[in-house]
Amino acid sequence: MHFSFAKVQRMPRDPLSRTLELIEAQTIYAGGFIGGGDWSVRFPPPGKIKFFVMGRGSCLLALDGTETPLRLAEGDVFLLARNVGFTVASDLALVPQFSSDIFAKRDSTIIPVGQGNDFLFLGGHLDTSHGGGRLMVESLPDFLHLPGSESGTSRLGGLVADLVEEAADRAPGAEMACSSLAHLLLIQILRRHLSVDQCDQPGWLRAACDSRLAPALALVHGDLTYPWTLTDMARASGMSRTSFTTHFRAIAGVPPLTYLTEWRMRHAERELRREGSSVTRIAQSVGYSSEASFGTAFKRVMGYSPRRNSRILAKNVELPDTT
């Protein structure tokens, strides 16, 4: 089951919602494991941003390349942005089962391992558009461990409890409910990590959560055809050009006008993937009156020409990774 950020289109778009919509982020709830006793499961490098919830009991989580394993306790949330293999187990000395072998035999979203029902381990991942994964990873550390003891009765803790209840009860509609709750859970994880006092890593997602930049981002996101200037953006945020530029670069990792150009090109790239798209029309929709100037900007940002992008995608061939 999955829930798409791009499907929620009736509410006014705040910067974080627009960013997640642009990269076409989809939360995929995969299910999990239930059991007890001695057990160990080995996962290959996921190639995607993964998240886990420890719904009941506890376990050890060992990441390849990380010396000290983590203990996940009931209510803990873990997000993995690094592309490495990992093992979850009651005892890491045990010989693990491979997750692919377990999944091949599954007939439900919750798979029994070991014996009993002492633990419940739930998980999923985040799918994004081509290039969108890089923008997510740039704003996230290799992994995030959010202890349930710190979540308490917060919104994050409440969502964890609701997800666990739906997954454990398996009532009619549980898969849809779990998918929606996983989507909300990831939003809360991002909000918590990207808040001013938690994150010092620049990137698009951090910029989208910055209250001082929000007015400027809402302005330029709302109309990509207008020739926005640095003065326009600074004025919207109530700052001088110098202060705005300094703050924007520290939070987003790029200067304001560079961000604006990249935002326009990623919008264009998304439109170019639609069947029957016109390069000329798309150029105009992101503020370029000349197809030539648009093509130059697109190639500089994306690494390939817009017409080559259209041809490759029309043949349903995956684009090379240019990140």
Image: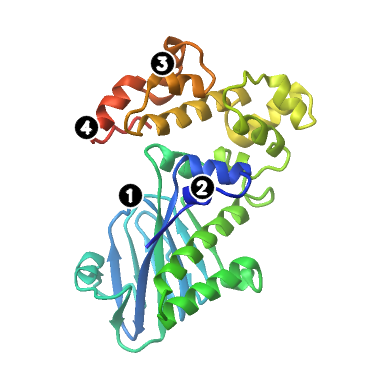
Q: Nearer the viewer, mark 3 or mark 2?
A: 3
Q: CA distance from mark 4 to mark 2?
A: 33 Å
The residue wearing badge 2 is: 140
Q: Please name whichever residue, 143 or 292, is drawn nearer the observer in this view of the structure.
A: 292
Distance (Cα) linking label 4 and label 3? 21 Å
**Vertical order, 123 against 222 (above or below):** below
Question: Circles 3 and 2: CB distance less than 8 Å?
Answer: no
Regarding mark 3 in the picture, which secondary structure is present there? helix
Q: Closest to the observer: 196 or 71?
A: 196
Q: Position of residue 95 (x, y in %)?
A: 24, 73
Q: Which quadrant does the C terminus fall into?
A: top left
Contact between labelled residues 2 and 1, with CB atoms less than 8 Å apart:
no
Which quarter of the picture shows residue 172? bottom left
Is disc 1 surrounded by few (<14), some (14 to 19) or many (20+) residues within 10 Å?
some
Q: Is tag 4's residue or tag 2's residue first in the polypeptide sequence?
A: 2
The answer to whether marks 3 and 1 mark residues whose Cβ atoms lie closer than 8 Å is no
Q: Is residue 75 visible?
A: no
Instruction: Give, as a three-letter code, the residue at label 1.
Output: Gly
Residue under pointer 3: 295
Mark 4: few/some/many CA within 10 Å (<14, 14-19, 20+) = few
Against 168, residue 3 (above or below) is: above
Q: Earlier in the sequence, mark 4 or mark 1?
A: 1
Please tell me which residue is depicted at 41% across the width and 31% down the height of the picture. 271
Question: Closer to the camera: disc 4 or disc 2?
Answer: 4
Q: Position of residue 273 (x, y in %)?
A: 35, 33
Q: Nearer the viewer, mark 4 or mark 1?
A: 4
Question: Which residue in the protein does label 1 denote?
Answer: 47
Residue corresponding to mark 4 = 315
